[in-house]
Image (cartoon, rainbow, N blue to C red):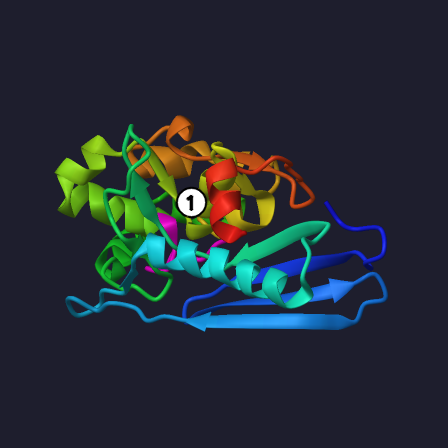
Amino acid sequence: MVKEDKEPYFIGIDVGTGSTKAIAINTKGTIIADAQLYYSSSNAQPGYSEQDPEILLNAFKDVIKKIIEEVKFAPVSISFSSAMHGVIVIDKENKTLTPLITWSDTRSDGIAEKIKNLPEAESIYKASGTPIHSMSPLCKIVWLRENDPPVFKAAFKFISIKEYIWFKLFGVYEIDFSLASATGLFNIQTLKWNDPSLKLCGITEDQLSKPVPTTSIRKGANPLLSESIG
């Protein structure tokens, strides 16, 4: 709870590919604190670009902790964004089956080329607004289906790093319209998951998060996570 003699402030966070950055802004729009933590990607094979979701989750928690330690009291609210196009495969126990496959991972180049030549390629592009490219979760998921059947079969959810952090905070799988619009799986006109995209991937909408507006707000984060922040 914010003390009455302290000016309220807000924290904005960007979970990026190379670092997680945070700023604290008061009600006058003045930046009163900032924090940044760096990390790297793993390139185990040519075209691969992966990250450990736990490292990014810890960076998210730590930048919040650093700002609270500097300002000396908690913010009114926290808002955050993340890098787009990444995919993490989650099992029924809500455990990760894969690292975060980042936007820059190009292992699905060949898949993208095949999809571009399909009759439904143009309609999927027009519906989703996302180019058919190896960066997109659409192509990443098709690659997993064709190249890693055990993981694909065990997949409960295909999510981004933002959804991963959101689930750790609130215990629900939700994705904002903006992030969903970068997947190649979302219809930007109906604001629902795009059936032709799902059919192409061989998945159902239940294996994706619930799309919500970018203005969506939740309260009451996971107490264990809140305690680790401070």
From where the camera sits, is residue 118 visible? no
Residue occupying image coordinates x 33% and y 47% = 88
Q: Is residue 202 magenta?
A: no
Mark 1 Cα shell of 10 Å, populated few (<14), some (14-19), many (≥20) = many
The quarter of the picture where the N terminus appears is top right
Q: How many marks?
A: 1
- Who is closer to the viewer here, 60 or 177? 60
Q: Is residue 34 above or below residue 59?
A: below
Residue occupying image coordinates x 46% and y 39% = 224
Residue span colored magenta: 129-137
Q: Quadrant of residue 7?
A: bottom right
Q: Is residue 130 magenta?
A: yes
| Left or right of 62 on screen, residue 103 | left
| Left or right of 68 on screen, residue 36 | left
Q: Is residue 62 above or below residue 143?
A: below
Residue occupying image coordinates x 34% and y 66% = 104
Prevalent SS, magenta region: loop
| SS at mark 1 in the image | helix
Whole-percent x, y for residue 109 in the image: 26, 62
| Left or right of 1 on screen, residue 181 | left
Residue occupying image coordinates x 56% and y 38% = 221
- Who is closer to the viewer here, 59 or 41? 59
Whole-percent x, y for residue 230 in the image: 54, 52
Residue receiving disc 1: 164
From where the camera sits, is residue 198 visible? yes
Whole-percent x, y for residue 212 in the image: 60, 37
Whole-percent x, y for residue 135 in the image: 37, 60
Q: Is residue 150 above or below residue 204?
A: below
- Who is closer to the viewer here, 76 or 155? 76
Amino acid under label 1? Tyr
